[in-house]
């Protein structure tokens, strides 16, 4: 019996000991948790909570750049990062065609044209026998070619005398006579060179370009600049046509293509004389060879506009003398063009003629007539719309082109 109670007592003691151990372990566990919690709370800074990484995460060490300590009051200069500027692409400057090769090309074009003067000469050479009716028809055709009544009669009479003596049995001889008489009318003795010699040292040569609306005056100024650049001359353009909004822009475009500066006004309708004066002043300042001044197209019937053109010339001459006054005429206008030429010559003392559109639709006789009327030579001619379709006039080449040589 005592054994039973002994066993019971041992079991009870074991239960009590186990309970005490469990109690102590639980208390110790709670104390450890409280300690960990206190340590975690001590690591809280402001609103930011530092969370320990999980054992599976890999933490890369932070690289901190350590700057050398600076003395008090010293300034650390940080070089700014400068982005490279984009390369500026300069517009390509064109090299204009040489004047001599231009005329050879224009003469070929003239020889293939079918104008009235060329037809009259060809018809005369094609007949087997020249009678009175043939001569009458020939003279009439010359007049309709804008040769003018006086020159047409003069040429007809000269040919009748010479061919009556030499005959026309030999076409080659007849053509030689025709060439000589026509060349005499065109007058190769006239000085057709542009006067580009400055009157005073240090001044540029000044070329004033005039004409009515629609003759291609501004385009002619741009093409003339190309002719001079091809001769290695430095040029400044003056956009004194201030009444046509697109004129200055058009002229500037012509200049840019060959590296020539254009003086213009930013105000539409500005005083043309003022712009012309500024262009010449710019030419003097830069020491250029030639200043070309484009003027507004004038109707020859408008007295006020023509008087203003005279003012432009007078204002320019306060800075430098005007070397050339070139009148641009449309070769297709015929007698109307002659009326224009006479009026302009009275206002600005024209020194040379530029004939534009002297192509298949033009009547080549106007070359002779305009020279007879004004007593000034044709100096430049244009036979097309190309940028280099303007060339110094060559009398021999013109006659040969008309005769198809």
Image: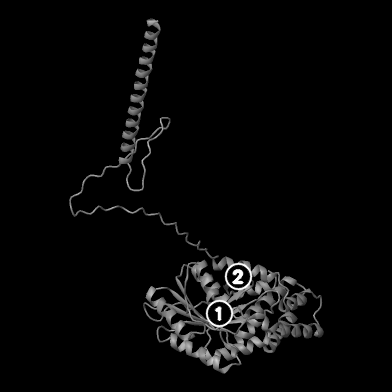
Could you tell me which residue is drawn at 23 percent across and 54 percent down? 75
Give the class, few, some or many, for how many residues have Cα within 10 Å of label 1's Cα (few <14, many ≥20): few
Q: Quadrant of the C terminus?
A: bottom right
Colour scheme in the image?
A: one colour
Is 333 placed above or below 59 here?
below
Residue on which disc 2 sits: 389
Residue on which disc 1 sits: 245
Residue 306, how many percent across, how many down? 55, 91
Badge 2 or badge 1: first in the primary sequence: 1
Q: Is residue 346 visible?
A: no
Could you tell me which residue is drawn at 25 percent across and 52 percent down? 76
Q: Nearer the viewer, residue 19 or 109?
A: 19
Residue 335, how many percent across, how many down? 67, 87
Q: How far is disc 2 from disc 1 in space, using C-alphas?
A: 25 Å
Residue 357, how many percent across, how many down? 65, 76
Element assignment for label 1: helix
Give the class, few, some or many, for how many residues have Cα within 10 Å of label 2's Cα (few <14, many ≥20): many
Q: Quadrant of the N terminus?
A: top left
**For discs 2 and 1, the disc positioned in front in the rendered view:** 1
Residue 384, how many percent across, how many down? 64, 71
Element assignment for label 2: loop
Q: Is residue 364 left or right of residue 347?
A: right
């Amino acid at each position: 019996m005592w054994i039973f109670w002994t066993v019971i007592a041992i079991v009870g003691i074991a239960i009590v000991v186990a309970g005490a151990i469990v109690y102590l372990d639980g208390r110790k566990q709670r104390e450890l948790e409280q300690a960990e919690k206190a340590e975690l709370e001590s690591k809280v800074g402001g609103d930011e909570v530092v969370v320990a990484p999980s054992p599976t995460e890999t933490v890369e060490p932070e690289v901190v750049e350590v700057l050398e300590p600076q003395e008090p009051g010293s300034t650390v200069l940080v070089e700014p990062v400068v982005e490279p500027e984009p390369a500026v692409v300069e517009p390509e400057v064109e090299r204009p065609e040489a004047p001599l090769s231009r005329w050879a090309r224009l003469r070929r074009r003239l020889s293939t044209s079918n104008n009235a003067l060329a037809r009259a000469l060809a018809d005369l050479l094609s007949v087997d026998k020249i009678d009175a009716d043939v001569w009458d028809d020939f003279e009439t055709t010359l007049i309709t070619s804008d040769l003018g009544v006086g020159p047409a009669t003069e040429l007809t009479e000269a040919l009748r005398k010479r061919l009556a003596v030499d005959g026309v049995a030999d076409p080659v001889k007849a053509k030689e006579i025709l060439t000589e008489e026509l060349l005499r009318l065109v007058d190769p003795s006239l000085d057709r060179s542009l006067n580009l010699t400055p009157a005073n040292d240090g001044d540029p040569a000044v070329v004033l370009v005039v004409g009515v609306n629609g003759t291609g005056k501004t385009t002619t100024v741009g093409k003339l600049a190309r002719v001079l650049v091809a001769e290695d001359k430095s040029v400044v353009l003056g956009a004194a046509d201030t009444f046509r909004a697109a004129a200055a822009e058009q002229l500037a475009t012509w200049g840019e293509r060959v590296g020539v500066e254009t003086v213009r006004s930013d105000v539409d309708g500005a005083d043309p004389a003022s712009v012309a004066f500024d262009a010449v002043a710019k030419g003097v300042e830069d020491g250029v060879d030639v200043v070309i001044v484009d003027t507004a197209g004038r109707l020859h019937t408008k007295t006020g506009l023509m008087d203003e053109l005279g003012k432009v010339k007078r204002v320019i001459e306060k800075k430098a003398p005007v070397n050339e006054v070139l009148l641009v005429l449309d070769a297709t206008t015929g007698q109307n063009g002659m009326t224009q030429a006479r009026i302009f010559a009275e206002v600005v003392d024209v020194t040379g003629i530029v004939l534009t559109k002297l192509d298949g639709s033009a009547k080549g006789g106007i070359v002779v007539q305009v020279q007879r009327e004004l007593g000034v030579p044709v100096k430049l001619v244009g036979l097309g719309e190309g940028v280099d379709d303007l060339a110094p006039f060559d009398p021999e080449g013109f006659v040969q082109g008309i005769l198809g040589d």
